[in-house]
Image (spheres, coloured by chain):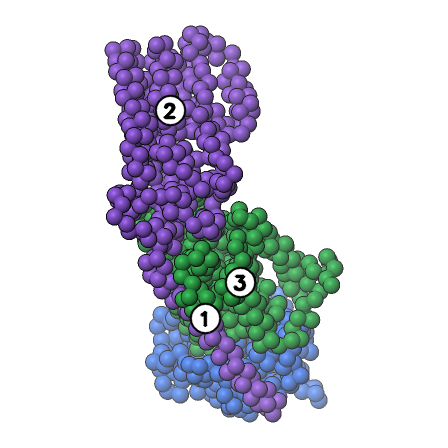
Amino acid sequence: MLELWHLSGGYRGEDKVKEISARFREGEVTAVVGPNGCGKSTLLKLIVRLLKPTSGKILLEGVDAASLTRREFARKVSFLPQARAVPHMSAGALVLHGRYPYLSYSRRYSKKDFEAVEDALAATGTEKFRDIPLESLSGGERQKVYLAMLIAQDTDVVLLDEPTTYLDISRQFELMSLIGTLRQRRKTVVAVLHDLGLALRYADRILVLEHGKLRACGSPDDIYHSGTIDCVFQIHTRRISSPAGVEYVFSPERSS
Amino acid sequence: MHTFQSFFMGADRPKFRRRGARFWLLAFLLFLAVAAALDLMLGSAVISPAQLVRIVSGADRSSPACRIFLYVRLPRALAAMLAGSALAVAGAIIQAVLNNALASPNIIGINAGAGFTTMLCMVLFPAQAWLLPPAAFLGALFTALTVSAIALRISASKITIILAGVAISSILMAGIDAIKEFFPDVLVGSSTYMMGGLSYVTADGLRFASIYIVIGLALAVLLRYEMNVLSLGEDSAHSLGMNVGAYRFILLMIAAVLAGGAVSFAGLLGFVGLIVPHAVRFFVGEDNRKVIPACILAGAAFVTVCDLLARLIFAPFELPVGIVMSFLGGPFFIRLLLTKRRHLHA
Amino acid sequence: MKIFSKSRRLRVKKEWLFRALACGLCGILSAGLLVSCVGTRQVSAGSPGSAVRSSSAEKTTFTDAVGNRVTATSAKRVIALMGSFAETWTDAGGTLIGVTKDAYSGHHLNLGKTVANLGSYTNPSMEQIISLKPDFVILSVDTPQHVKLCKALREAGLNAACFHMETFVDYLKVLKNFTQITGREDLYRKNGLAVQEQIHQIIAGTKGKKSPTVLFIRAYSTGYDVMNSSTMTGAMLKDLGAVNIADSDRGLLHDLSMDAILQHNPDDILVVVMGADEKKALTLIHQQFQSNPAWEGLKAVQNHRYAVIPKDLFHYKPNARWGESYAYLSKLLYGS
């Protein structure tokens, strides 16, 4: 379980994120949404220790994250950044790198490492890409391989920064449902999402941020009914129930 | 047989990879052994293997051939191998750390930095030849730190890093020119130093530099895996638990030690740092665990071969090694640019 | 999972093979370094120069320009890596087995077929030098490559030394060292002390005369340099009492304009030509200065005190003819 206590922080001392407190439970997917510049990515970077918080605490299973070494922390929290490099290696090699926090000084892979990698490849359906160089894969396929790397890292907490950008819409759905399968592994998933529809559709809980502050926190139902999204994004949200499921439709704010 | 076009377009790339990396490492090793042997045997006087045995066993102690072997060929071959390995690995490290395939000690200004402090040292302490290797090392280090600071502060794009390196390099080269302007007496032979040369290298002169270089190479070999992780990108590497800042710094220091050490006795040898790592990647792939050892072998072999050619082409007159390396390296660099463009579009 | 572990076993085996080879290479490298270090000590003991420890009184010890203590017994096989030193050695009564290319021009040495031509003095081949089995190798301290080479030759057990020669005083010192080796005290007197006496007399003859101001230029096919009193000929001019305008006006060393010459309006303008293409050098001077209309207005030109002076007296080291050089200049400056 991941807890944030009055977390504040930002770039060059200026607090982009102000006093955010939240609790993320295991087996749940939480989506973080908000308009541009609200601090969603900054929040993730603070949690993963890429940025130093100016105040507040991060707790993992009740333990202060700041007290953990890098290695210990990397075994508990994994992160998929928004800007993703395409290194020159095969997909299998990339996923193997996910085992870095577990390697001994000799930097040799153990049987357990290879098993974790196989498992991750199977979970994301990317076994066939094992020996194929990353640059030869399509964006969607590559994203799945990156997810496999995070799975191989075998952490309790998985943070994803806009994992669906640049993907075709079908790939977006595919990736989100893959992310959903992490629930079965009892992982705590926090994903920053740009797409409100995806957030409302796939997440168990939603955090709405505005100007660095937490505006609302709750299930998609709660958030929808509270009208926070309409207020923060200046749009009009409608929910349509159909036999296939629940759909959300967004339209510009009614000028009246 | 390559056609001109396919040579430059890199059309043959997949073919090389079919053979394993191990095969190529062994091939490089063999190539180096042959190059070294030829370098020791050929020259103004050919030293046959039989003579070699006599010299090494101590039976022959004072013939000209013995002297030539022990005091001209052997130090020179060692210098070529050390300089080649050091510069190639320094290049590979810099390319990994700055995540930029076009970076090299030359472009990042390490060579110019080492050259500048060496010249300064020659001016301020003309009689103290033993100060030159540490001076070169410090110059390389300072430049590496400066470029590293600029790169990390701006969170620079690859272009900014190269531009910073070019700017620093030109400042230092201007500094070298300024020294030459104000102290013309000291630097009559400086053009040879600029181009890089292995003439008159002595075992004594190699002593300090070789310690730096061997240590640097050992450390580079130990940190190969970390270089791989760095290629995933700063944020990913961090999230995997790596202390990115610390490793980048250590690796750049190692590159500075290697480049500085090499420059201190070989002058400003260009191209090795850029060319060899790339050439090697065509054969063993991008995995730094193979690239680094391959650079050690191929770098040593490349400079040894160039030195041999430099001595033989217009014998007994010697071309500076730098010229031969540029003529061999230049066309390769052009090929690099053309194939690089293909990768960017992929 | 199965695929990984099978190839992994194979990889582990190859890994050990490779490590063995890598260790082997390191071993060879270290051995190489060791051999060269040990070899140094071995061969120094057997250097040919000191082999003749006879009771002959032909053993001299002096310190060369780099600080090496040079012990030279009678040296029969001598290589001079600079033309001027080749001439000095000949003046000292020595014979040569090897010289550089520049010894063949401007030094009037009788070098027969037995003398090896080692090419340009800037980068002589160390292997060639060693192959000739010399007793003594003469190098110049003013060429950095020579300093390096001297060190390397000495480490190889050869008797090598660096010398400095710019002015006559330097020449005298070098001649003394050389004649100590050759044992030709008489030649020291003839080619050294006698010349010194001659020069002293010439200089004494200039005392009391009005000091002329002089501009001295060294021209070559692609440019020219203004020379001040720290150069060979500049020093001679200074000894003779002339005032070099480049000494007071340092800017002239970088940039010589017609205006600057007009401003100083020296009594004498001297030009020495170097390089292979003398005609081109003189053409350059003509274009730069002589074709300028203001040239005719110069004092030196009007008094016919513009002269092109011979390079074997004023560019190459004149060695034993140094006295001639002084006499020539004295005549130009003072007319006697």
Cα separation, mark 1 vs mark 3, equals 19 Å
Chain of the residue that carries numbered disc 2 in the rendered image: C
Mark 2: secondary structure? helix
Mark 3: secondary structure? loop
The kind of residue tagged 3 is: Ser
Cα separation, mark 2 vs mark 3, equals 49 Å
Cα separation, mark 1 vs mark 2, equals 56 Å
Q: Which residue is mark 1?
A: C28
Mark 1: secondary structure? helix
Label the green chain with its letter. Answer: B
The hue in which chain A appears in the rendered picture of the protein: blue
The hue in which chain C appears in the rendered picture of the protein: purple
Say which quadrant the C terminus of chain A sits in.
Answer: bottom right
Q: Which residue is mark 3?
A: B48
B90 or B38: which is nearer to us?
A: B38
Say which quadrant the N terminus of chain A sits in.
Answer: bottom left
Vertical placement of residue C30 versus B160, above or below: below
Q: Mark 1 vs mark 2: which is more N-terminal?
A: 1
Q: Which residue is mark 2?
A: C321
Q: Position of residue B8 (x, y in %)?
A: 69, 58
**What residue is at 38 percent from the left and 43 percent from the top?**
C76
Q: Residue furthest top?
A: C303
Foreground: disc 1 or disc 3: 3
Chain of the residue that carries numbered disc 3 in the rendered image: B
**What residue is at 40 percent from the left and 83 percent from the top?**
A72
Decide if residue C166 is in sight here.
Answer: yes
Q: Is residue C294 left or right of residue C207?
A: right
